[in-house]
Image (cartoon, rainbow, N blue to C red):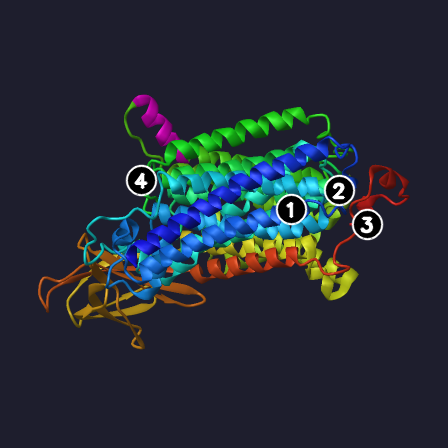
Amino acid sequence: MHDLNAQIGYSGLVVAFLFSLAGVGVLGRQIWTSSHVAVRDNPDVTVNSESGKYQPLVYALGVLVGAAVATGALEHGLITHDFSLLYVQQNNSLETPLLYTITGMWSSLAGSILLWGLILAIYLVLASWVVSRHSSVVVTSWVILTGLVISGFFFALMLGPSNPFVTLAHPPHNGLGPNPLLQDYPLVAFHPPLLYGGLVGFTVPFGFAIAGLMTGDLGTSWSTNVRRWTLVAWGALGLGILLGAWWSYQVLGWGGFWGWDPVENSALVPWLVASAFLHSVIAHNRRGIFKVWNVSLICSTFALTILCTFLTRSGVLESVHAFSNSDVGPYLIGLFGVVVILSVVLIMYRADSLRSQSRLDAPLSREGLFLANNFAFGALAMVILLGTVFPLAYEAIEGSQVTVGSPYFNEMTMPIIVTLLVLMAIAPLLPWRTTSLDLAIHRVTVPLGFATFVLVVLVVVGVRGLGPLIVYFLAVLGASSAIRQLYLEICRKGFRGIFGRSGGGMVVHLGILVVACAMASALSFGHRAQFNLRPGQSVTYYGHHITYRGVRLVHYPNRSAIEAVVGVDHTRTLTPALSQYQGGGPSVGTPAVDSSISNDLYLTIDMTPSSTNGVAEIGLVVQTMVQWIWLGGVLVGIGALLCLLDVPGSTRKTTRSLDQEKLLKVPEGRLS
């Protein structure tokens, strides 16, 4: 029975790989055949053709079936504690709770790549079904063929250096169990799948980029399709990053939520580049401009997801989030190189067709600020990427190690983030194409006056600190701008105004601004201290009355813990702990967090007492508005969903041709 898990699982990998390979061959032949019957000059010929319409779906389903079989076999092995599988023996034990037994699938390298392949297969099935309904057979074939090449690559890794179904000749009676940090908080069930859902999801927009570059069809339909699929991946990745910050805050015991960890950075960089695309593609739809820029951004985003995968799964980074050394690094960096070279070559090949239909009329316009916004996003991504990979490059060249810490990232990124907040506040206020300085000043006056009023009130009530005050001022300015735009959309369209890219986009802006204010507050007005207390001793710290009552030893199925019993404000009890997990290793701290809408009290036990009445070292962190970070993230997710839900009548006819724009008697700027 135990061997059956390995046999079925490996067979599933073979099926997925063979369907990927066969799909590439069949779809490639279909594209070649179509290109020799004048389809290239008349793409509409194949739009209604039934021949080959469902072939992409057939091969995508084949890959999904193989991936699902392999996933089911590995999960069955974990749940039944099949220690004849090396992966199960290393990432599971008899004492591991069911939740962490299930999540053990993505607790290590081979299983995480299998999850990657499963999610990619799901995306391919959805894309082949949706795209074939709105695009030509040739475009659909190119999109799915690109995805099948990527899936074939990853399933080849699973058949070779990253095989999750390696067996042991003499299985042990028990396993080592998962990493202690991966069995300490339920967010591990959601954070990695969402993160992978975002990173893997950029495969579909990249497929559209390849399709557009190969066929030369980069019009409005192309930009609309790419925007929607990018929005799905962008939203999933953003929520995954936010849940990662929440997990770090709740589990790692340092009282923070973002530490510029290399693995955190490597996920943030493609999200920033995708954010730039989601802004500039609006100008592409509206004016037919920024074509080469948009194609480059999509290709760069996907290339960066491969680089992110390399950094986290090759063992080159020292991080609590990274996997151990593996043999997949050279293959991943090779794929990254292929993606970059192919993208550059195709963009150069299509340089003529990528020329914009119209030009940027004036820097002082909505699309002008979108371009500035793109440069700011690009600069921010570059600064973070440079700080992340510089230690690797330095070690490769000099042979010695160097670290790039938080001071570099804070000093280099803060000016760019402030610039982005300024652009976020002003861009929605400006009309398209061009505007006068008087009109721009008129539209900014009321939001600027309100933001100034709020700033004065904050200073009067005692808020200090240049950094947080700047963030609050710009956040109020940006919120005023977003609310104004939402109000105009609702006036024009009724309740439908909150849907679509304009209404939903403003909700996203509001969520980002909430996150920015909350982070500025938590980082600027937090307080931390350590107290040595005996049982019964109390201390008052920034409005909280803390009483240490002693320690207790508690046994759980997968760990034993020394818990400090701490009374808080005479009303509740918190129990920070030091846990020892099955399998040995160092003790792992488990913080206790008392959260409210205004502030968090964060407790850790930094040193256990030597006797029952001995001294314990208790760490305290008081931070303001931390919960608003997560609430802002929820608002961003809602906004992304609203952007996708384009109900009838919720979007304007913005895809006029250049000739139609010239026929308009009223300047577009007066309509915004």
The mark nearer the N terminus, 2 or 3, is: 2
Residue shown at 76% from the left, 33% from the top: 37
Q: Is residue 6 left or right of residue 144?
A: left
Q: In this rendering, does residue 473 appear at all?
A: no
Q: Is residue 573 left or right of residue 466?
A: left
Mark 2, residue position? 46
The mark nearer the N terminus, 3 or 1, is: 1
- Residue 490 versus residue 418 in the image, above or below: below
Disc 3 crowd rating (10 Å Cα; few below 14, some 14-19, many 20+) is few
Q: Amino acid at mark 4?
A: Glu
Residue shown at 16% from the left, 62% from the top: 616
The mark nearer the N terminus, 1 or 2, is: 2
Q: Amino acid at mark 2?
A: Thr
Identify the secondary structure beneath mark 3: helix
The mark nearer the N terminus, 2 or 4, is: 2
- Residue 564 versus residue 571 in the image, above or below: above
- Span shown in magenta: 388-398
Identify the secondary structure beneath mark 1: helix
Q: Nearer the viewer, mark 2 or mark 4?
A: 2
CA–CA distance in space, label 2 to label 4: 51 Å
Mark 4, residue position? 318
Q: Nearer the viewer, mark 3 or mark 1?
A: 1
Mark 1, residue position? 227
Q: Is residue 630 left or right of residue 604?
A: right
Disc 4 crowd rating (10 Å Cα; few below 14, some 14-19, many 20+) is some
Tell whether label 1 touches label 3 (CB within 8 Å).
no
The mark nearer the N terminus, 1 or 4, is: 1
Magenta stretch: includes residue 38: no
* Residue 221 drawn at (x, y percent): 73, 44
Magenta stretch mostly in which secondary structure?
helix
The mark nearer the N terminus, 3 or 4, is: 4
